[in-house]
Amino acid sequence: MKRYAMQRLIEWKQTPDRLPMIIRGARQVGKTWLMKEFGRTEFESCAYINFDRNRRMAELFFGDFDVDRILRGLSIESGVAITPEKTLIILDEIQEVPAALQSLKYFCEDDRHGYYIVAAGSLLGIAMHGGTSFPVGKVDSMDLYPLSFTEFLDATGNATLLDLLEQQDFALVSAFRDKYIDLLKTYYFVGGMPAAVNAWISKQNYTAARRVQRRLLADYEQDFSKHAPTAVIPRIRMVWDGIPSQLAKENRKFIYSVLREGARAKDFELAIQWLVDCGLCHKVGRVTKGGIPLKAYRDIPAFKLYVVDVGLLAAMTELDAKTLLMGNAIFTEFKGALTEQYVCQQIAAELGTEAYYWSAENSSGEVDFVLQHGGKVIPLEVKAEENLNAKSLKTFVNSNSLPFGVRTSMSDFRKQEKLINLPLYAISRLWEVCDAFEG
């Protein structure tokens, strides 16, 4: 399947003064496949080394950080002659040998720039190893997420529909809205985890995709026990298992007492940060106003927590395909949570920016996401169905003297005074639409 991150790697390859590249992301988002495919398509040879339970590599990096000695060891381990300018060196699960991560700075400092090194590991280990000096300023990095909705369209053979979105031909897009909506609902269930998408593509079977999702959730549970500090594991499980109930609330702000009566922030801060660091959660902070830069107006104690993938959230709640695809009034509220989860995921994967939200101090007013782009604040309200109401959005736009706001829903694209409605399935075009808005 096509991953847009491949273009980022190609650009990195073409950079004369490139640094070693670290690809970060949650387990099973496709890091290994991406690196190997990059090596296969862009290089004459590829030296792949997996550090997981690899005693030889632990011993190799236990010694000094002499670049020539390390290169000889990597060549022997991979069985590939490493040739400058022609070989891609892949260091997979690098967090399992912290010294290997530290050694990357010596490759950066080496006068020779003919070596292409790509390393990967879940944030699971990279952020949590104590006593290891991370090579700050000596490596480049990129985050890999589950397949975005546009990548899902491409993977499922809907490239023509994707082309319409990219061309922003919204008149024609509206003519095929039923197809987009059906595919979006499928994406809500299948999500973007590569193994689940592959299961759906190969069998066109929701049960097969859900089986993969359950396996992934079980693997994550095992990772808690394997990698997290023992004292924190029970609280990590409580936070992880409690996310669906947090998002099911009308106010989706994270409330500690939902996890346990009397719980306080200090009881769960480390557990939440651990989940965020390993890529399993998106933490969306609250801002008190729509000013530039948004980070300056962050209300640090207040936040919302989403998981890494909308399909996994559906699996965590055991939401069946019929309910999700056909619609059921009982699940209207949680469909809103799924829709917010979907948008949050696309903001990270497609738009590449940090998301915030806003809520009024003394009322129920809230804007689901507040983004910063091109020197402007972009408020984004999310509606699960065809909803054209936007009272909180208009209030936020006017009170912060913003040029416009964006509402995303199942309704067709339209521009009004100080308001854009962007279909949920076209959220990837948000920046282009905002840049073209003239009021």
Image (cartoon, rainbow, N blue to C red):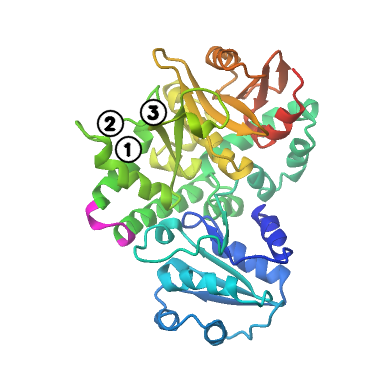
Specify start and end residues of the magenta stretch as a single range.
226-231
Secondary structure state at the residue bearing disc 3? loop
Report which residue position mark 2 lands on.
258
Secondary structure state at the residue bearing disc 1? helix
Q: Is residue 297 magenta?
A: no
When asked about the image quadrant of residue 137, the answer is: bottom right
The disc placed on residue 81 is none
Mark found first going from the N terminus, 2 or 3: 3
**Which image quarter is the C terminus in?**
top right
Residue type at the position of mark 1: Gly
Report which residue position mark 1 lands on.
242
Q: Are marks 1 and 2 in contact (CB under 8 Å)?
A: yes
Q: Determine whether, in the image, residue 434 is placed left or right of residue 346.
A: right
| Above or below for 252 versus 77 | above
- The alpha-carbon separation of the residues under discs 2 and 3 comes to 11 Å
Secondary structure state at the residue bearing disc 2? helix
Mark found first going from the N terminus, 3 or 1: 1
Residue type at the position of mark 3: Lys
- The alpha-carbon separation of the residues under discs 3 and 1 comes to 13 Å
Secondary structure mainly formed by the magenta segment: helix
Report which residue position mark 3 lands on.
253
Q: Are marks 3 and 1 in contact (CB under 8 Å)?
A: no
